Image (spheres, rainbow, N blue to C red):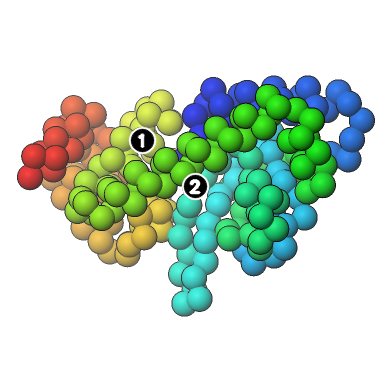
Amino acid sequence: MKSIPTELAQNLLAAYRRMRKAPGDCMEKDMKPGETLIRQGESPQDVFLILDGRIKIHHGTPKGSEYLVAVEGPGEIIGEVEALTGERYTCSATAVKASRVAVIPRAAYGQWLERDHGFSLLVNQVLSHRLQEATKRSAIHLTYPLEYSVLRLLSILAEENGGPRLAVGKEELANYLGTHTRSINRILKDLQHKGVLKPSREIEIASMEELERAMQARDQA
């Protein structure tokens, strides 16, 4: 559930390394698993660039539900929108595992954008990619049944992980897709019967061919 392509993330890390050669206010912070980096509703003070580890981006509702927006890794930037708009953070950010982030004060971030046109272009690419992905995700939720959304997400996760065993739980899938865990359980059991998933507690793809076949069947339905 990465939010930007790997090459773009690597380019952002390279831009950060160039920036660090010059004196500035930027610092680096080590985080423990479960530690909060950003709290939803707080005023923006800093922008963060993930240097190592994994950070979960999640949104809480007034009713107490929590929706997973993304799980981001090295090279991904957090809080860049609020730093420019001045509005409160729309999501929280929590370390999934031991992580290290660059902490860039809001004023220093604005100066970096003005000074480094290459970095500004990278940030524009990040924002454009996220907007495009959000549009695709909304279109899929509106157009296709939940099973198709699950199949597509499983395919994306398998590509990101480089293998059939997925580092995600049923609750995370439900949060990400904005549905109930019981609905995800029902779909996962059905996919096990179809030979798409292995019959185990962990979510593991048994056959990418069957997964693609199931997606095609939904496309043609």
Q: Position of residue 178 (x, y in %)?
A: 36, 60
The residue at 71%/27% (across/down) is 117
Tag 2 secondary structure: strand
Q: Quadrant of the N terminus?
A: top left
**At label 2, which amino acid type do we have?**
Ala
Choose the circle earlier in sequence order: 2 or 1: 2
Dot 2: few (<14), some (14–19), or many (≥20) neighbours within 10 Å?
A: some
Q: Position of residue 23 (x, y in %)?
A: 92, 30
Answer left or right for 213 relative to 24: left
Instruction: In this rendered view, identify the residue nearer to me: 21 or 60.
Output: 21
The residue at 62%/35% (across/down) is 123
Tag 1 secondary structure: helix
Q: Residue furthest right?
A: 23
The residue at 28%/64% (across/down) is 182
The residue at 50%/38% (across/down) is 128
**At label 1, which amino acid type do we have?**
Ile
Q: CA distance from mark 2 to mark 1?
A: 12 Å
Q: Which mark is residue 103?
A: none
Dot 1: few (<14), some (14–19), or many (≥20) neighbours within 10 Å?
A: some
Residue pointed to by mark 2: 70
Q: Position of residue 200 (x, y in %)?
A: 28, 45
Q: Quadrant of the C terminus?
A: top left
Residue 19 quadrant:
top right
Q: Position of residue 84 (x, y in %)?
A: 69, 50
Answer left or right for 218 relative to 135: left
Task: Report the label total.
Answer: 2
Q: Residue furthest left?
A: 221
Residue 197 quadrant:
top left
Residue 119 in view of the camera: yes
